[in-house]
Amino acid sequence: MCGIIGVVQKRGVVAPFLHQALKRLEYRGYDSVGVTTISDNKLYVKKDQGKIDEVHRRLNLDEMPGSMGIGHTRWATHGPPSMLNSHPHFDCHNEIAVVHNGVIDNFMELRLELSKKGHKLNSETDTEVIPHMLEDYMKEGLSLAEALKEVSKRIEGTYAIVAMSTKDNGKIVCTRDGNPLVIGTKSGVSYVSSDIPAFLPMTNDMILLLDGEIASLTTDEIRIEKLSDGSSVERDTIKISWTADQAQKSGYPHFMLKEIHEQPEAIRNTLRLRPETIKEAAEIIKSSERVYIIAMGTSGHAAIAGRHMFASLAGILPSFELASDFSDTVYDALSDKDCIIAITQSGETTDTISAVKFAKEFSTKIVAITNVVGSSITRLADHTVITQAGPEIGVAATKTFMVQLTSLALIALALSELTGFKDTATIQGKLESLQKMPELVSNVISRNEEKARRLASLFYDKPSLLFLGRGISMATAEEGALKLKEIAYNHAEAYSAGESKHGPIALVQDGYPVIFVAPNDDTRKRIIGNIMEMKARGATIISVIQKNDNDMSSIADHTFTIPSDVEPEFSIMPYVVPLQLFSYYMALRKGYDPDKPRNLAKSVTVL
Ligand code: G6P
């Protein structure tokens, strides 16, 4: 949550870059935006409530002098969206500017202390204490970096902080504890950001900053020190394989639609993961006593699907737990003989990171599945699988979900080989069908996109929809309902089709839309029974079914079709796609921006 960018360059005006970088960070929050630059030893600021385009129309974010600056796009925690609460925040003399992501837990006592000393704080944010504390330390003669070191000793919570000052010109200083910051480097320019895509058009060279470190960036040098003892840190540059083009809309009206269309390629690239990487994950799982899969949001649905894959293919049934509730559910029932599979596309979700840290106290092994190289989870995990979706910009996850499923399928097959639960020929057959998945998903998109648009115009004004499935299709239904809630704001609920008659059926009356995920697997016959129950109460049935499933299509009012047979363990991959498209067109039909759903952010870095 909250996007951060900072840049210091030798010459040229930096404001248009800051503006574009913030656009690339908008998925982190979009209730307000602000930019500060330094020119002729003076701070210039433009900030306000609203999405970046709106604020730019009012203030023209491109017209600011100076070749260094910092910017912020906000997802409000402390204080509602407003001009005063927007970042950057300043000291009493407008000499120090700070942007921050995270939460300062002890901000109230710090505020009180500062007010008593005569500081005038203008906002309701926790962030504003930082520039005022920096002001006091700098008054004592400390440099900006030294002052930030002192501040970091006093603040409690999780944070990524970027600061600059006219009193220590030509330098950007940053530190982190619990929230992401990455440094980008290029000859004569240094960048710092919460996310790689912010500087991707300028450089693919990145340096990680870790928790408890502080970095000083100038045009020629990046210095990193440990906060604990001031020792300097030498860290290699990493080359990121993502391309700037992947973070552009490339002719699509929205990132979400582009990313749905990129799914075949994302699966293809993930299928090329080194077999040793997959095998090592499988070996850790195989050698563990208890196996938990933990995740949040869409990644949680991949986890539920993964659980089915592991059970069906390898005879291992992990427990799925929401990462946010993990420690409250398992208590001390963990040991060094257990393992956790943590799934998080961003690698930064605080709920997931906290659960992993909790498990590490018991020396439990951690296998991480993430899409972001160098993200926080990769540094906590014993073994990491990096999925190959490329940058995902749409807040609602689509292609990162697909690659999580792909990697889980690969691990399940490797695990099957290790446990001997399925014979070699069966495993080989399943692997071959997985290899055909990119083509299948591509066909599913082309055959269902127009249908999704049409059905959206029939159902967009329905206040509530039910999504039902059985077995692994329960995860498909969950993801379909979540997508619809997230971006089109229709109330949508997913239920096991079996459970639906124990309560949810009471909601059903004439014309109530019920969406069934009904692949041609062992659940099909029972699903037919559930469809009939819903029909008998007047429900309008929309089914996602295999092409030529005449029984199913005869009892549905509308169908999305999957062109060919699919291995039951992998059905979620093609079957979820029409539901992604349906949500996208529902949002569009209602006039909402699917890339920026209200109140949400792509990476949730608060508990
Ligand atoms: C947020 C996003 C969701 C995402 C979830 C977990 O809520 O809006 O799209 O699924 O976080 O994110 P992660 O990065 O851990 O997969």
Image (cartoon, helix red, strand yellow):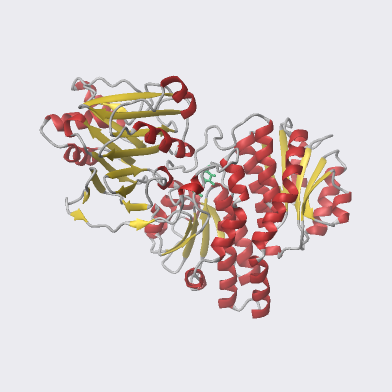
Residue 64 in percent (x, y) is at 33, 26
Q: Where does the C terminus fall, quadrant-wise? A: top left
Q: Is residue 489 above or below residue 216?
A: above
* 512 left or right of 270 in image: right
Q: Is residue 8 above or below residue 573?
A: above
Q: Is residue 499 visible in this depiction of the protein?
A: no
Q: Is residue 292 above or below residue 33?
A: below
Give the residue at x 26% y 29%: 38
Give the residue at x 33% y 48%: 184
* 310 left or right of 17 in image: right
Give the residue at x 82% y 40%: 540
Residue 292 in percent (x, y) is at 52, 61
Between residues 573 and 206, which one lies in front from this camera angle?
206
Q: Is residue 325 visible in this depiction of the protein?
A: yes
Q: Disc count in the image?
A: 0
Residue 519 in percent (x, y) is at 76, 57
Q: Where does the N terminus fall, quadrant-wise? A: top left
Residue 491 in percent (x, y) is at 67, 35
Between residues 50 and 59, which one lies in front from this camera angle?
59
Between residues 516 and 115, which one lies in front from this camera angle?
516
In the picture, residue 582 is in which quadrant?
A: top right
